[in-house]
Image (tube, helix red, strand yellow):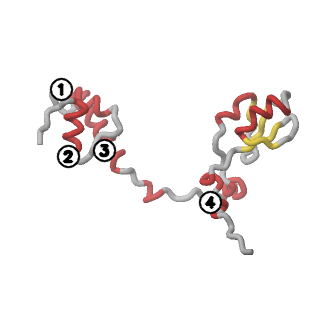
Amino acid sequence: VTRAFPSSLLRPAAARGVMVSFICDACQETVRKPKVESHYQRKCPNCWVLSCVDCGVRFEGDGYKSHNTCISEAEKYQGALYRAPAKAAGGKVDPQTRWTDLVARLAAETSTGSVSAGPQVVELLDKMAQLENVPRKQKKFCNFLNSAFHAPPNG
């Protein structure tokens, strides 16, 4: 009988959702993060310091709770030779982020007076600068202004 190797094991540990594991410094038992509390209560009440299996960082008390992810095996074993994978699309910023940055910059310029605008426009831009979901397309933008801010459509 031929068994296929599970494809889930071929993915990197971070993509598989592998939990961080710790070593109890009192009893030297390896404990996965969700089981640390029960380890404290049932097996090792003397446990005060936990060390991460992957990176070796020591956590005292409840400090382990903030340690959700750790270094990959490649980082651990390659050390200084490790090169992180290149960012997708050469580090391009997505269009929505550019648009919200533009709205925020325009709001700042109208607030300081370097770009002239009426008080209603300045107030509207200040409100829009606080949002992340401002539509980019003209028709959707006009509908957004009308529904969110009750601004009259200006075609």
Sequence order check: which comes first, mark 1 or mark 2?
A: 1
Sequence order check: which comes first, mark 2 or mark 3?
A: 3
Residues at badges 1 and 2 in contact (C-beta under 8 Å)? no
Sequence order check: which comes first, mark 1 or mark 4?
A: 4
| Residue closer to the observer: 48 or 38 | 38
Mark 4 residue type: Arg
Q: What's the residue at 85%, 28% (across, down)?
A: 46
Mark 2 residue type: Gln
Q: Position of residue 112 (x, y in %)?
A: 25, 27
Q: Which mark is residue 99?
A: 3
Q: Position of residue 135 (x, y in %)?
A: 28, 43
Q: CA distance from mark 2 to mark 4?
A: 42 Å
Q: Residues within 10 Å of mark 1 (few under 14, many from 20)?
A: few
Sequence order check: which comes first, mark 4 or mark 3?
A: 4
Residue at mark 4: 11
Q: Position of residue 143 (x, y in %)?
A: 20, 40
